[in-house]
Every structure is written in C-alpha cells, then in structure tokens.
Amino acid sequence: MSRILDSIRKGACLPAYAAFVVGFMVLVIVEGAVVRATGSGAGCGAHWPLCNGQILPHHPRLATIIEYTHRSLTGICTTLVALLIAWTFLARPRRDRARSAAVATGILLITEGALGALLVLGGYVEHNASTARVIVQCVHFTNTMLLLAAMSLTWWWMRPRETTPLCPTGRTAGWLAVFATMLTGATGSVAALADTLFPSPSLHAALLQDFAASAPLLIRMRWIHPAATLLTFAATMWLLPQLRSTPRRWVATLLLIQIVLGVADVLLLAPLSMQVLHLLCADLFWIALVAACSSLLSPESAAST
C-alpha cells in the first residue's frame, strides 16, 4: 500500500491518466454532436441539471436517453477532471505549467457547464433557429475547444520530453493556425446546426439555399465555415515546415483526413455518421495542433517528472 501511495504522490501514472481524461472529453464532445444532430437537446425538458425534474428519468423516450447519456458522461468527466486537478497539484511542483493548465481546465469546465445550462434553460435547442442560438452555439463550442486545449496541455506538459520552441516566424504561423482553427470550429458548429435544422434534398438545392436572399441566417452563414477552413489550411501549411517530425506528421495527417471528411460530409448532405466522424477528426487535429504549438504558451522546456 505504501508503494502505491508513494507512486501516486510521485505521479508515475499521471500522464497516462491525463491522456485518458482527454480521450474521455473527446467522447463527451462527440456525443454532444449526436444530441444536436438528433434534435435531442430538449430530451430532459427545461430542467438542468436534473432530467425532467428527476435524477433518473422514468419511461424515457429516445431523445431523453440521448440527452441523459450526454449529461451523465459530462458528470463523469467532471469527476475525472476534479481528480486530475487534485492529482496534478499533489504530484507536480509549484509553478509547474501543468498545474496552470489544470487550473484553466477547471475554470473552463465550470463555464462549459454554465453554457450548457444556458442552452437548455434558454430554449436554444431542438428547432430553435434564432440569432441568439447562433451566438450561444458559437460561444459554447469555442469554450469547448479551449477546454479541450487546456486538458491537452495538462497532459502534454506532464510528458518528460522537452518542447522545441518555435522560431519567430513559426510562432506567428502557430498563433494564426490556432485562432483560425478555433474560428473553423465555431463556424463549423453553426454549419452543422444549419444542416440539422434545414436539411436539403440534394447538393444542388443546398448550394442554391446558400445564396438565396430569403434563406434563414443559419443557411446564409454556412459559407463562413469553408472560408475559415481555407485560412486554417494555409496557416497550417505555413507552420508545418517549422515543426519537429513527429508533431508535423500528426498535424499533417489529421489535416488531410479532416479535409476529406469535410468534403464527404458536404457531398453526402451531412448524415449523422459523417458529422460524428468529422467532429472526431476535428478534435484530434485540434489536440495535435495545440501540442505542436505548446511552446507558444510556455517557451520553457517541459518540467521534469
């Protein structure tokens, strides 16, 4: 028992646990996309955090099961993050940057929950296509990306390997790639919402909708997502030659897969399976990009374990 406690205090398995928490967060995000794509956001009624005023819903319909599953996964993730923060402060020294990332994770998790509650209690679910929902959706997904980034840095900065600082040109390209990717993610959530609320019978009809003056705001905003994607692609291509071999390989591979999935998503008119795969790859690309650009936030080499 003393050996186990000593191992916990030294954080021997902490990086592996942090990686597990990151993976679980990706699962929560992807399941959240299922909630939105199936219109199950009101599956628990206008209640939060309870589901239809109950801890465990009785005789639930499918939408309730989907939404309740998402809330349950979120609750588990919250517990895992609380454990991660406590373990990080126990095992890592003062002023360790992994501690700072863990604190940021905790703060962003709180705002994530608040924004999730706002979506439900404000009625920004199901068939609501208001401008307010668009704004809340963008803010919510941006916070989600920041939360995933903070979690990823908590894990990445625990690794014993050193981070190679980027040169001034690389730092500029890195920041541009990071901000462009966040813009792409936020606008992608809006485009996915538009595809869900206003499905098109064909690709031709979808393109006509994009340029129709009478089309809803959500439809007319869809073009921003591919435009942001082009910016992300350009910034990432600028950044890639200035990265080390391993991060460069992961970022480049995931960027290519993401583009293929994005095109397939459009051509197939955004079925649920493609939306989930597209978002999953987007999350993995974001994690790889954040890790590759980690020296932007902390130029010093990784703390020793």
Image (cartoon, rainbow, N blue to C red):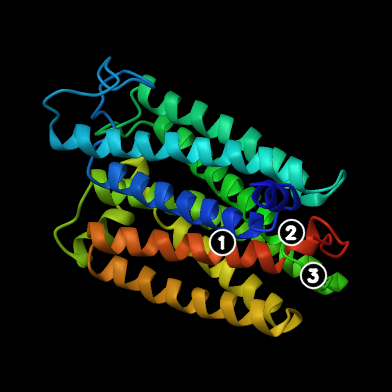
- Circle 3 crowding by C-alpha within 10 Å: few under 14, some 14–19, many from 20: many
Question: Is residue 221 at least partly visible in the picture?
Answer: no
Residue closest to the eye, 197 or 205: 197
Tell me the SS state at disc 3: loop
- Residue 82 x, y percent position in the rendering: 59, 36
Residue for point 69% across, 47% down: 2
Tell me the SS state at disc 2: loop
Amino acid residing under circle 3: Thr
- Circle 2 crowding by C-alpha within 10 Å: few under 14, some 14–19, many from 20: many
Mark 3 and mark 1: span between their CA atoms?
Answer: 18 Å
- Determine the residue located farthest toward the front in the rendered image: 1
Tell me the SS state at disc 1: helix
Amino acid residing under circle 2: Trp
Residue identifier under label 1? 286
- Circle 1 crowding by C-alpha within 10 Å: few under 14, some 14–19, many from 20: many
Left or right: where 180 falls relative to 265: right
Q: Point out the image quarter for the C terminus.
A: bottom right
Q: Is residue 124 above or below residue 199?
A: above
Left or right: where 130 falls relative to 78: left
Residue for point 58% across, 60% down: 181
Residue identifier under label 2? 157
Residue identifier under label 3? 163
Q: Is residue 161 above or below residue 140?
A: below
Q: Is residue 267 above or below residue 103?
A: below
Location of residue 295 (image quadrant): bottom right
Residue closest to the eye, 144 or 90: 90
- Residue 12 x, y percent position in the rendering: 69, 58
User: Does label 2 or label 3 sit earlier along the sequence?
Assistant: 2
User: Does label 1 or label 2 sit earlier along the sequence?
Assistant: 2
Residue for point 59% across, 39% down: 83
